[in-house]
Amino acid sequence: MPHPSYFLPKGLFVSQIQRFIPKKWKQSIKPVDIQHVHPSASCNALESAQETFTSVDASMIDSLLTSLKEFTSRGNLLDAFKTVSLIRLHASSASQDLIVHPISSLLSSCTDVKSLAEGRQLHGHIISLGFEQHPILVPKLVTFYSAFNLLVDAHVITENSNILHPFPWNLLISSYVRNGFCQKALSAYKQMVKKGIRPDNFTYPSVLKACGEELDLGFGKEVHESINASRIKWSLIVHNALISMYGKCGKVGIARDLFDKIPERDAVSWNSMISVYASMGMWNEAFELFGSMWAEDIELNIIIWNTIAGGYLRTGNYKGALELLSQMRKCGSHLDSVALIIGLGACSHIGDAKLGKEIHSFAIRSCFGEVDTVKNALITMYSRCKDLKHAYLLFQLMEAKSLITWNSIISGCCHMDRSEEASFLLREMLLFGIEPNYVTIASVLPLCARVANLQHGKEFHCYMTRREDFKDHLLLWNALVDMYARSGKVLEARRVFDMLGERDKMTYTSMIAGYGMQGEGQAALKLFEEMNNFQIKPDHITMIAVLSACSHSGLVTQGQLLFEKMRSLYGLTPHLEHFACMTDLFGRAGLLNKAKEIIRNMPYKPTPAMWATLIGACRIHRNTEIGEWAAEKLLEMKPENPGYYVLIANMYAAAGCWNKLAKVRIFMRDLGVRKAPGCAWVDVGTGFSPFLVDDTSNANADEIYPLLEGLTMVMKEAGYISSEDFGSGDETSGEFNEEMKLVSNNRC
């Protein structure tokens, strides 16, 4: 009976096999003439020949294994499959491992080159050989199906295997977590434990990550207890995973306690704890830990650099973010697209177009200039730096414009109060079939208030009520409350405010500011008290709003008390804006010496606006002494705003100081300062039509000026006092002030 290894599979010829046999092997085999040999010698010869062929098979398998390794490394599956067939042919009488290892290599190659059909075919071949339970092939099959996201197939293979080692289950659980199926990962872990398979140090990190993603603190604690109860060796990887899990579940104290107990931390330990602080918005703690990490000379990777730089950006330390990026480069870290986006964001906020262009150049050189997220950040940076031309050019050059891209350019136009361009782009976006999201609307609503286009704001309000997906976006409704409040429509703002099921400090701040602008200080204070009762801590902006409300309503005592509470009760250090509010509060109330003391004793350099506030108060209350002192300080700063010089001139005119008035006008002439003409808007139904003082070019001028004169007379009869009544001697200034106050009242 012939030797089983001499049978050839269908379609496979001897010539195909012979081409793999080295020449020296062929030369070493001498033909045996059985007809001329004695019977006993014939048997010996046959045995010798058989031994020779066995030797040839072993040498051939070694050669075929070398060839298989070369074919799989190059991804040459066709030749690899043929080679495995040849190995099977010559190893059929040998040990199982001679066949299993080549099949394992071929399966890995199918995974690497993403060949699903060939891999499935090989799986069928494994089943036909009865190797589906082999401890080497089961993990390979799980890896293969997981690579194609066929996790159901991977799960079936794992649970049907009788392998007691956790390796296949580890692969399955990590695949579930990697693909976002954390609940299924936890189910697989429970199934594994139920089968009596003990988890190891490679099981727990994936399971703990799944607990963190699902915020399943209860099961996470159970896993932690099982780790402590197990006999496995302590693992830093598992300990780091515990820190991350507890951090994601909001247990920062436990995470920090685990971190402090690590005998020797690695970079992942530091990164995990810093990430926990960052995710909870505890940036001061994150910055402090980063400093300790740096002091201990721990290697910093790009992720931790970006996390801290992003933290600086979020907390308003824009220069700190840029300095950190510069430090990254000095330390040899290569900036990635995330770092560039952070840098561009910082440039956007401080208006540093020069540095922004340098980052743009770096992005082009480092091949990040074509990344869409970087392009969107560039559009935002240029538009925020008032370079709308470059922003629009980048926008036009983008072939595939995402919603984020449209939002970037629309937000840029809104930032520069370019209402027409913003409206045009919004219409274009809709024509392209892209629906605006809450960010789009939240960008446009403040513009509606700033340009007095309440009609558009109401249209957006209607659009918001029709979109069910907008109901849970508090940012959007805050913007709507702010839009109505800034437009003077406090009742509409209050209606939106009252219908909100959830409110935050922004909601209250917008409503308080709205009441303040209308002089309803008591209503603003009542809201501020309600905000405190709901345990909503005010921030610096809230304090500006409530102090301003006190100022506009003459609530001096309440304003002083709130200013004192800023530091003692709310833990807020007063900024320049808060001192400006107090200056205005005292100035409006006629307490000019107190206003002067605020300016003199505050730890900030006064701005031209603060001096102007004090000058305006001195003019109203006819305090020439302090007014002249403030005027001298303001003139020393040589401000570019012509309105400040007009204010000083009006003060001197009201006091009859004509020589000083003449000096101010000469000063303005020498500096080349010209007062901009007053501008007003008239709602003509289809939009707002602007017009200037003495502007007769407007087609409706003949109708506008008689109406303006009539309104002015009505206002005077109602007791409105214009700046002319203070004897400014500047007729144009009087007209300017009257018109601007009229516009201000109409807008309110």
Image (cartoon, rainbow, N blue to C red):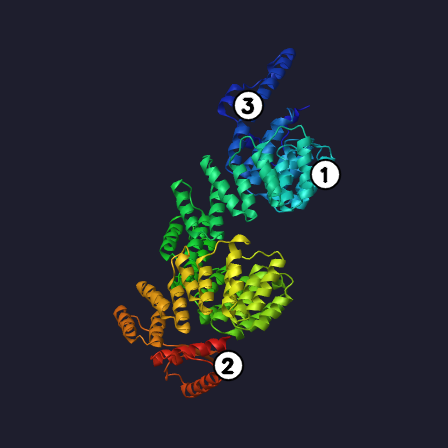
Give the image quarter of residue 226. top right
The image quadrant of residue 146 is top right
Q: Position of residue 434 (x, y in %)?
A: 54, 64
Q: Amino acid at mark 2?
A: Gly
Tell me if residue 509 comes above or below residue 335 in the rendering: below
Of 462 and 88, nearer the camera is 462
| Residue at mark 1 | 191
**Any part of residue 692 in sight:** no
Q: Residues within 10 Å of mark 1 (few under 14, many from 20)?
A: some
Q: Report how far apart the C-alphas of labels 3 and 2 lie in the structure.
A: 95 Å
The residue that mark 2 highlights is: 685
Q: Nearer the viewer, mark 3 or mark 2?
A: 2
User: In the image, what residue type sits under mark 1?
Assistant: Gln
Residue 671, given in percent of the width and then of the height, sits at: 27, 68
Q: Nearer the viewer, mark 3 or mark 1?
A: 1
Number of marks drawn: 3
Answer yes or no: do the residues labelled 1 and 2 have beta carbons within 8 Å? no
The residue wearing badge 3 is 59
Q: CA distance from mark 1 to mark 2?
A: 70 Å
Image point 45% across, 54% down: which residue? 345
Distance from Cα at disc 3 to Cα at disc 1: 46 Å
Nearer the observer: mark 1 or 2; the answer is 2
> Which quadrant of the structure image shows residue 474?
bottom right
Q: Secondary structure at mark 2?
A: loop
Q: Are marks 3 and 1 in contact (CB under 8 Å)?
A: no
